[in-house]
């Protein structure tokens, strides 16, 4: 264990030292943000407002789940912005083909994201192109294809009723469906990471890919499948966003790249792979969402919001972001 981790653990009360320090600090910051928000608005701690924030967080949570999978490998996926947009646009585009298109709108949007993830994964795993480079390239390609599709104008296709219900409806009274979707995705991620050979292989590759390969793991296939899942989840996040807004929009995914990475890293997942828990990612997503909400409640100008948002992330990363897996 590194000295940074040891110092961080000493700052925590004795009962909390058995937990991941980064996760504990993230949840403590959430409590602080809730208290700060309550000072500016009496409704900040109301169940209605908190459920609304969870609904907003659910879209980022779905996207961050795929990002966490890739970061655990020691890779990065920078194609998120336009994979999100592509998933949203293609799902809405399918809806324009009548009842049959509406029925397949959600799967088609997710499928388009998975295809982009497949291109990222194949290039990274088999062609050995750095993931930072190939995902930036596919992001640009996806952007170009969507601009060609729309002619540079705002998309005219609308979300299907199923997309709107999935994002804004309530299967359980007072509980947004978006939260239930994130809960289902999160449960699947926890099972994948903790109960499957695939999940153990992801952690193994993140710690040392060559050692994982020599132990008999098909590392290339695991890396490729991880990028496919990441692309599918990013596109699914776009489908939910389109349902929330009732239609897709140009660059609707741009606002989710930095928050998705920040949520994963602030939740304790090591940027070089091999270490992290999904509980930490959940804490990171909620933390990022509450921070953005508080900055809006305080009516700070956009430049000031970005400055504070970035400063908070830098400060928290300085606290525990450099620790290396034991």
Image (cartoon, rainbow, N blue to C red):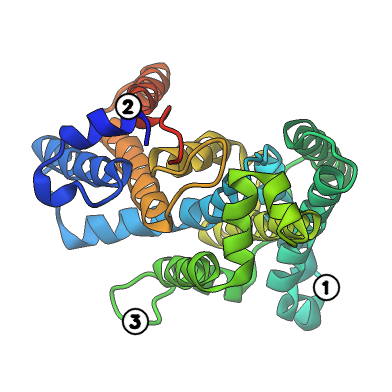
Front-most of residues 35 and 150: 35
SS class, disc 3: loop
* Sequence-first disc among 3 and 2: 2
Question: Distance from label 3 to label 2 (Cα)?
Answer: 47 Å
Task: Report which residue position mark 1 lands on.
Answer: 97
Residue at 43%, 72% (x, y): give it.
177
Left/right placement of residue 126 relative to residue 130 reads right
Q: Is 3 placed above or below 66 here? A: above
Q: Quadrant of residue 174?
A: bottom left
Front-most of residues 32 and 15: 15
Left/right placement of residue 89 relative to residue 316 reads right
Q: Position of residue 55 (x, y in %)?
A: 39, 59
SS class, disc 2: helix
Mark 3 vs mark 1: give the one in front.
Answer: 3
Q: Position of residue 191 (x, y in %)?
A: 50, 72
Tell me the number on the disc at residue 3.
2
Question: Distance from label 2 to label 1 (Cα)?
Answer: 59 Å
* Sequence-first disc among 3 and 1: 1
Q: Badge 3 local density, few (<14 within 10 Å), some, or many (20+)? A: few
SS class, disc 1: loop
Q: Badge 1 local density, few (<14 within 10 Å), some, or many (20+)? A: few
User: Are the two marked residues, 3 and 2, in contact with CB atoms closer than 8 angstroms?
Assistant: no
Front-most of residues 310 and 276: 276
Q: Is 40 placed above or below 209 here? A: above
Residue at 10%, 42% (x, y): give it.
13
Task: Report which residue position mark 3 lands on.
Answer: 172
Q: Position of residue 114 (x, y in %)?
A: 76, 60
């Amino acid at each position: 264990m590194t000295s940074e981790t040891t110092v961080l653990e000493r700052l925590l009360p004795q009962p909390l030292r058995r937990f991941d320090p980064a996760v504990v600090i993230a949840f403590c910051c959430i409590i602080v943000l809730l208290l700060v928000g309550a000072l500016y608005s009496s409704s900040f701690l109301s169940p209605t407002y908190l459920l609304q924030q969870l609904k907003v967080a659910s879209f980022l949570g779905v996207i961050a789940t795929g990002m966490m999978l890739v970061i655990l490998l020691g890779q990065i996926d920078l194609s998120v912005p336009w994979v999100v947009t592509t998933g949203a646009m293609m799902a809405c585009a399918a809806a324009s083909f009548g009842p049959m298109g509406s029925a397949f709108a959600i799967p088609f949007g997710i499928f388009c994201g998975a295809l982009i993830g497949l291109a990222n994964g194949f290039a990274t795993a088999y062609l050995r192109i750095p993931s930072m480079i190939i995902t930036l390239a596919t992001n640009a390609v996806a952007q170009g294809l969507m601009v060609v599709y729309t002619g540079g104008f705002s998309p005219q296709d609308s979300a299907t009723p199923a997309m709107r219900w999935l994002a804004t409806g309530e299967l359980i009274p007072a509980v947004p469906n978006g939260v239930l979707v994130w809960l289902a995705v999160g449960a699947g991620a926890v099972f994948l990471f903790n109960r499957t050979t695939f999940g153990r292989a992801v952690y193994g590759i993140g710690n040392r890919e060559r050692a994982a390969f020599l132990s008999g793991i098909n590392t290339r296939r695991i890396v490729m499948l991880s990028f496919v899942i990441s692309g599918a989840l990013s596109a699914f996040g776009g489908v939910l966003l389109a349902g929330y807004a009732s239609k897709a929009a140009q660059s609707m995914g741009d606002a989710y790249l930095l928050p998705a990475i920040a949520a994963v890293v602030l939740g304790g997942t090591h940027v070089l792979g091999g270490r992290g828990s999904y509980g930490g990612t959940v804490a990171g997503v909620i933390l990022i969402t509450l921070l953005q909400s508080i900055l809006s409640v305080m009516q700070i100008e956009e430049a000031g919001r970005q400055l504070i948002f970035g400063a908070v992330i830098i400060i928290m990363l300085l606290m525990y972001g450099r620790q290396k897996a034991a």
